[in-house]
Image: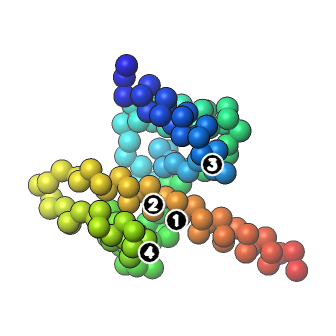
Amino acid sequence: MGKNTRCLIKARDLIKRFQPDHVVMEDPNGAKARRGVRVCVLLARLDAEAVRHGVPVAKISRAQVYRQFSMFGVGSKDDIAAAVAAMLPQLAARLPKRRRIWESEHSAIGVFEAAALAITFYALDAGARRSKSDHSV
């Protein structure tokens, strides 16, 4: 069984178990996206799986995440991870040390990327709600 199949089975189980309001994922076609073919295929299949279960999918680009976190002076994934840890102290203990250019990315950075996507989603959603209420006055 391949990686994508294992991920899809796990995602299907999580969707059934937690019945989320939304599935938030990185937009593989968005600005600053650097995903390989396998991951792009996986994201498309995850999107279809969520829709099949009636769960709306929100795609957030890396550029949107960087814009959202720009108020914290971020310039890298490490900076975003530190900002997420400051917002969510429960994750602070998992914050990896800053990566040196010759080191590979720490496995825990994915947790911070996922949290940054969620934070960006909620910030954009709140901004859209504010904008709608401003126009309805």
- Res. 119 mark: 1
Residue 63 visible, this orientation:
no
Residue 86 visible, this orientation:
yes
Residue at 54% x, 34% y: name it. Answer: 13
Residues at discs 3 and 4 in contact (Cβ within 8 Å): no
Compare marks 4 and 1 and give the one earlier in the sequence. 4
Amino acid carrying label 3: it is Pro
Compare marks 3 and 4 and give the one earlier in the sequence. 3
Relative to 82, say whether 121 is above or below.
above
Please state the horizontal and vertical placement of residue 125, each as a whole percent of the image.
65, 64
Compare marks 1 and 3 and give the one earlier in the sequence. 3
Q: Which is more toward the observer, 68 or 81?
A: 81
Amino acid carrying label 2: it is Ala
Q: CA distance from mark 4 to mark 1?
A: 9 Å
Please state the horizontal and vertical placement of residue 60, each as a whole percent of the image.
53, 54
Residues at discs 4 and 2 in contact (Cβ within 8 Å): no
Relative to 65, say whether 55 is above or below.
above
Amino acid carrying label 1: it is Ile
Residues at discs 1 and 2 in contact (Cβ within 8 Å): yes
The residue beneath circle 4 is 87
Numbered disc 3: secondary structure? loop
In the image, taking residue 106 as reference, residue 125 lies left or right, namely right
In the figure, residue 75 lies in which quadrant? bottom left
The residue beneath circle 3 is 20
- Res. 115 mark: 2
